[in-house]
Amino acid sequence: MSTLGLRVDQVLTTTRAVRKRLDLDRPVEPEVIRDCLEIALQAPSGSNNQSWHFVVVMDEDRRAEVAAVYRKAFADYEAGPLNPARMPADDAGRHAAQQRVFRSAAYLAQHLHRVPCLLIPVATGRVERLRSAHRQANYWAGIIPAAWSFMLAARERGLGSSWTTTHLRYEQEVADILGIPFAECTQAALVPVAYTLGTDFRPGPRQPLDQVLHVDRW
């Protein structure tokens, strides 16, 4: 199984949210997904519960059903107040960047049915039953590190991915499509996975560290 041979720091800083540069015509081998998931299982989890499941959707008809729900949810988002086009533009540069992200997200929604692999990380239990911030933090610590480890492993193997949560507006519909026990499990995200068109990803623009760093106290 070939890898890109990136340094650890390169993998960590160049694993981008890939939407427009997904190769929609190249199949993804199931064994590559399994390999990435084997790595994901080594991630830390809250209280070492390992209360995770991963639904891999590669069947064309199932992908199309999930994508239809995703597009319905994206249409809600597009019409809602969080659409960057409807938000005040206090910072012209940042507003332009948000617009670019929105356009790429719209492209993904339009073409999601063509993405060869959809990964849905699932955590055991329903998160809305957890009342305290402490319990919710512990709950998400059981699935998010593993999903991110999967995405990092995928990057090293020439695969692109993107963490999306849009479909969760209609989580139960996707649960019904895929047979996920909705009353017993919570979907954390939907991660489209495909080989990328080129592998030359770079670190993205971020705020200067000193704007967000607090030493010893806020």
Image (cartoon, helix red, strand yellow):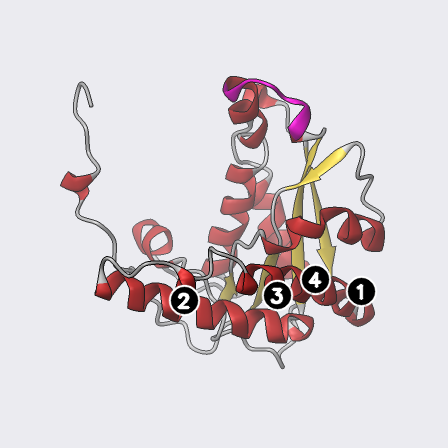
Residue at numbered disc 3: 75
Q: Position of residue 127 (x, y in %)?
A: 65, 30
Residue type for callout 1: Arg
| 3 vs 4, front mark | 3
- Mark 2 or mark 4: whose residue is earlier in sequence: 4
Q: Residues within 10 Å of mark 2 (few under 14, many from 20)?
A: some
Q: Which residues are magenta?
A: 128-133
- Report the side of 62 relative to 210 (left or right): right
Q: Is residue 167 magenta?
A: no
Q: CA distance from mark 1 to mark 3?
A: 20 Å
- Location of the N terminus by quadrant is bottom right
Q: CA distance from mark 3 to mark 4?
A: 31 Å
Tell me the quarter of the picture where residue 87 sits.
Answer: bottom left
Residue type for callout 2: Ala
- Mark 1 or mark 3: whose residue is earlier in sequence: 1
- Mark 3 or mark 4: whose residue is earlier in sequence: 4
Q: Residues within 10 Å of mark 1 (few under 14, many from 20)?
A: some
Residue at numbered disc 2: 85
Residue at 28% x, 61% y is: 89
Residue type for callout 3: Ala
Whether label 2 touches label 3, CB < 8 Å: no
SS at mark 3 in the image:
helix
Depicted 209 relative to depicted 195: above or below: above
